[in-house]
Amino acid sequence: MNIVTLQRPRQESRGYWLIGRTLASIRPALRIARDIRRLERMSDYELRDIGLSRNEIRFAVRHGRNRDIAGHWRYPNGAL
């Protein structure tokens, strides 16, 4: 008669899995903070050149520049 035993995952592999999941959840927040810092260091001229103003930086980094899709205000006459 064959006996089937179920093996528990090794404790080491579980620890690596938890570390990987934790890093995966932290990465987006780190990217957002980094991108906000980079844009805030730019001059008003540079921001205007890419179509942003200072008060739009945080929204643009988190949601993108198309405010119409995100449910925010629209530009007059539908212009982007």
Image (tube, rainbow, N blue to C red):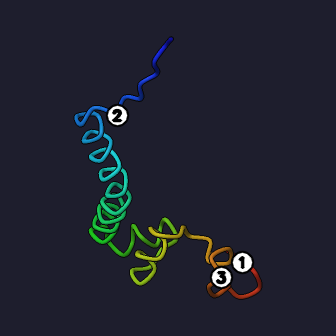
How much space separates mark 3 and mark 1, taking CA atoms? 16 Å
Which label's residue is closer to the chain start, 2 or 3? 2
Identify the secondary structure beneath mark 3. loop
Question: What's under tag 3, amino acid-wise?
Answer: Gly
Judging by the rendered image, the residue that carries numbered circle 1 is 79
Identify the secondary structure beneath mark 1. loop
In this picture, is 65 found above or below 26? Answer: below
Judging by the rendered image, the residue that carries numbered circle 3 is 71
Q: Is residue 24 left or right of residue 64?
A: left
Which label's residue is closer to the chain start, 3 or 1? 3
Question: Which label belongs to residue 8?
Answer: 2
Question: What's under tag 1, amino acid-wise?
Answer: Ala
**Eye-nearest disc, 3 or 1:** 3
| Residue 39 x/y as whole percent | 34, 67
Considering every residue shown, the one lying at the far top of the view is 1
| Residue 46 x/y as whole percent | 39, 67
